Amino acid sequence: MRVTKAGFLLLLLNACNSHLNKEGTAPTGELRTFSQDQLSYALVNQYVFTPKCVRCHGQTGGVNLETYAAVSQNLAAVEGAVRAGSMPKAPAPPLTASEMQILSDWIAAGAPEQASGGGQIAPPSLEPKFVSIHDLVFAKKCMHCHNPAGTAKDVPLDTMQDLLTSPVDLVLPGDPDNSYLTIVISPGARQPMPPRSTGLTLSTDEINTIKEWIKNGAKD
Amino acid sequence: MKFLTLSVTTLLAGTFAAASAQAIAISEVAELQFHKVNQLVATRKIDSGFVDHMKSVALAKDPAGPLYLVTFQEEADAGQAAFTVVVSADANGKSQGYQQQAGTLAKGPANWGGKAPLDLLEKAVEYVVDSTTDPLTPSFRDGFTAASIEPFQSANGLVGKVSVTAGTASGTLLVFVDLNGQILSTAKQ
């Protein structure tokens, strides 16, 4: 029954948000899923609330989503808003299919604070792969502006194709030094991205991972 | 009926062909080439001093082919030819190459309080591309031909005064931009 409910909820969420994602899936076509006994608040917070919600729904937002207690209190509103496609509100980027899947599975499982399996999911480590860079860097630090309704909508970062076909040569496979992406994220860039005023400057590890991905040919 | 179908098909095909030929406003084609100049400076293919003496950007159709030629020119020192870089770009604004033309890099002091006039000029062109509320910008967005910047002393201090011209509009659009890149006001001259 739980599986049916989760599937139904996912269908609804996807139906409401399918227009927001070109492929209806995560950027590379993969859906990141977790087993029922892995679902916990920490997991959802890590994959959904922190990267996609707390920028507005933090200390300054009307509805706080920074703690399990706060999220529990507002769970119906969260579910309703995501289901209706009204959150995240533009220009913030929409939830990806993977994020919707994790959120809907968690809600369908009764929104547990702790994973029933008892084990903690290790935080995902940044890898020189597009989906990893997309989820752990772009979604958190860039897509507040680089999304279809954002101020940098002309330079989307949602799919690998966006990067490879960008008119500004964001990614030149095998050539990180001349790729505009690495130029603007590198320390000392004349026009740094994200802008210094945002406080979202990429870490050395993030920059090096992106460079490595490009150097490897930006294939996947 | 067959004629009508053929006509509609031809009309639609023509429309799609035009749309694919010019996917973005030509002012955006020019705006995207600022990134190319930044890339050339960052990779040391052009001297970094180029951005500090930037004077103008101009866009024209390449008479020899389907590309646009976007010409960046700096303020020349007295008696010198202006250092010029021409970037070629397709209708989507994707750079296809660049050429550094004859001219001498300006050595004189830049008068922009430590800011790069290239960046201020870019902000003004960006405004022309993106503004949806300023009634003065549309004809300059779609018919953009050139923009040039000069220092201007406002009541609040030094700002950039950018003069924008368009083939489809009479007069000049003035865009005033502060040294932080914020657009202050626009006017038509």
Image (cartoon, rainbow, N blue to C red):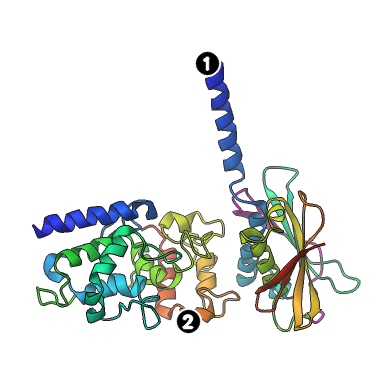
Spatial CA span between label 2 and label 1:
63 Å
Q: How many marks?
A: 2
Which residues make up the magenta segment? B87-110
B137 vs A145, nearest the viewer: B137
Residue that appears at 32% across and 54% down: A16
Quadrant assignment for the C terminus of chain A: bottom left
- Tag 1 secondary structure: helix
Can residue B163 be seen at all in this image of the molecule? Answer: yes
Farthest right residue in view:
B79
Residue count near mark 2 (Cα–Cα under 10 Å), binned few <14, some 14–19, many ≥20 = few
Q: Is residue A115 left or right of residue B50?
A: left
Q: Amino acid at mark 2?
A: Gly
Mark toward the viewer: 2 or 1 = 1
Residue A29 found in image quarter: bottom left
Q: Amino acid at mark 1?
A: Lys
Report if residue A105 lies within the magenta region. no
Residue that appears at 44% across and 54% down: A161
B82 vs B9, nearest the viewer: B9
Quadrant assignment for the N terminus of chain A: bottom left
Chain letter belonging to callout 1: B
Residue placed under numbered mark 1 in the picture: B2
Circle on res. A24: none
Residue placed under numbered mark 2 in the picture: A199
B73 vs A93, nearest the viewer: A93
Chain letter belonging to callout 2: A
Report if residue B106 lies within the magenta region. yes
